[in-house]
Amino acid sequence: MAHAERLDLGLTLTIGGTAHAIAPADILAFELDLHGWGHEGRVEFRVLDETAHGGQKKDKLLADFLKPDLVEVALELKAVHSDTATKPTYTSLKVKGLGLDKALSEETVAQAKGAAITYRHYTVRFVDAARLLWTQHFPCALYTQKTVQDVLDAHKGDKIALANDWDAALAATCPLLFLGLSPESGASFYDFVVWFVHARNGVLAYDYTAQGYQLRAAKAATGTPLNLRAEDVDTVTVVFPEVVRHDVAILNAAAESPSNRAITNAKAVTGIRQDVLLRTDIADDVQKRVTLETARLKVRGLEVDLEWNRFPTVAFAPGALVKLPQTAGWVASGVPATETFRVRRMTLRAEPLPPEDAGEGEGEGGDDARRPSPDSRYLFTLTTRLERKDELHVDLPAFVTPVYPRFVEGLIVSEVGEETHETWQAYTDTATSLDSYKVKMPLFANQIIQVPFNANLLPGHFYFPAYKGARVLVALDFQRAWLKRHLDWRAGARLPSDGQGVHLLVGKTTENGTSMRHFYDDNKPVLRLQRTNASDTEKIELKEGTLLILVKEEST
């Protein structure tokens, strides 16, 4: 319910490095939707300009507002209570964001004796910095032997502050990290960050004091709770969120070590489950996923909705800890009187009071009837959603899951033999005993990644490892990669099309290897097997009416 309320407001717009402070009496309306992970808002205000009519007051905002420069919005509000016995110490709610879009209209108001003044009506919608900038950021970048924190630091930009507390997920050095984000898939860097937090059971928190972000392992639970005043609250509603009714099973589809690990939920309905399918030869990977999914299986507790009849003297923001009043009416609602809650969401809305309700300081006609009074009285609403301090459920913004894999070309690496030798090499991981190829990625500064050393698209009775320098298509996921297919013919392997030949070429080079080819000569099939080592050649050839066996060594 909306109530008449006095507010002490401060609004500053910074455009192109120039700050424009807006007088509190010129702020017409605002809306704020504040979450634990970020915010969005809208503010309307008017600026007087008399210069077109011979006056002295000039709209200094207009020139900058018309530019496409980034708009930084800083809005501050605090209560102005006149019914208290002693003047309390007021604290402010501060919100800073970046302009999402803006609008401008002009109004000319007639005055006495034919004079006129102009008011420009400005509207700015704004969001927290990451929601504006990261939703337009679609990097395609490869990192090797880096941490996730390194990746975040490389892409946060100078408008976004990060103060993370999640070493388990962010501080570990990873063999491969790949951002393959594209506008066509719809998943931006913002989506990637939220997805990463969700997939690893973390917390994305926005700090309204520092106006920055934190990626955390758990919600912050420190600080002295604020005692809410019963007389400031209009209504209280206890809300019981949806309960998770499914079990979970972790399935490992590896043929040599299949497993089915059940995770039981005490509140599940029999027969309802969510299966997580893995395919890994590493038992520790299965256990890590079991641990993760067990932690994610959370049964939510009750929450409390408060509708306020005025803005509190001691302002707070999402993330703050509070204690509810202990009066009989509150206890009767079923909320434990001694329990500590966390503010999860706040919505605020302020509109001008109707002229007849605006109070003293406004006239009955002319421009004064169109503006808020000097003490900034508004028709104001404030609602908050509270959760228990120990609530494990994490509220996150909606996100689009990044689309993987992305496909990039690479070159096979082998350190066996001389540089010109087309050798192959398997690299064994000391921790897992699994073999892999090394692949050089020319697009990404020739960084070296590792992919599984396996039969790939060939059946197991063909053993043809990828050779040094082979051009291959690599499938890249966020933290893993694999060979998709080969992209070219080996040097010397391709045959003329008029012979309709096929060719198997093995060995280090064409001068040090073996060739077996089948082709047509005068429309008659020919089979040739030839072994070459520099000047030494052995050849067997079968053609129409002829069997040729040749051993020779060229003189040098």
Image (cartoon, rainbow, N blue to C red):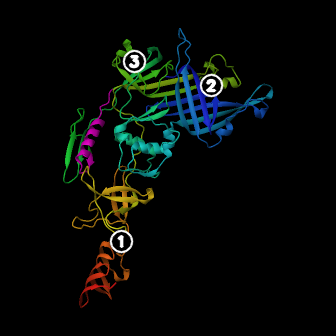
Q: Which of marks 3 and 2 is nearer the N terminus?
A: 2
- Label 2 or label 1, whichever lies nearer to me, is 1
Q: Type of residue at label 1?
A: Arg
Residue at the (34%, 58%) spot, across then down: 438
Disc 2 from disc 1: Cα separation: 74 Å
Question: How many angstroms separate mark 1 from mark 3 (CA)?
Answer: 75 Å
Q: Quadrant of the C terminus?
A: bottom left
Choose between 471 and 335: the one closer to the eye: 471
Amino acid type at mark 2: Pro
Label located before the other in sequence (1 or 3) = 3
Quarter residue 510 falls in: bottom left
Q: Quadrant of residue 351?
A: top right
List x then y, in percent, for residue 83.
54, 11
Residue 406 horizontal side relative to residue 276, left or right: right
Residue, disc 2: 24
Disc number placed over residue 324 in the picture, else none: 3
Give the labeled residue for mark 1: 490
**Amino acid type, residue under disc 3 in the picture:** Leu
Q: Do the residues labelled 3 and 2 touch (CB within 8 Å)?
A: no
Say above or below: 291 vs 140: above
Badge 2 vs badge 1, beta-carbon distance below 8 Å: no
- Residue range in magenta is 276-301
The answer to if 510 sits in the magenta stretch is no
Badge 2: residue crowd in 10 Å (few <14, some 14–19, many ≥20):
some
Q: How many labels does the image show?
A: 3
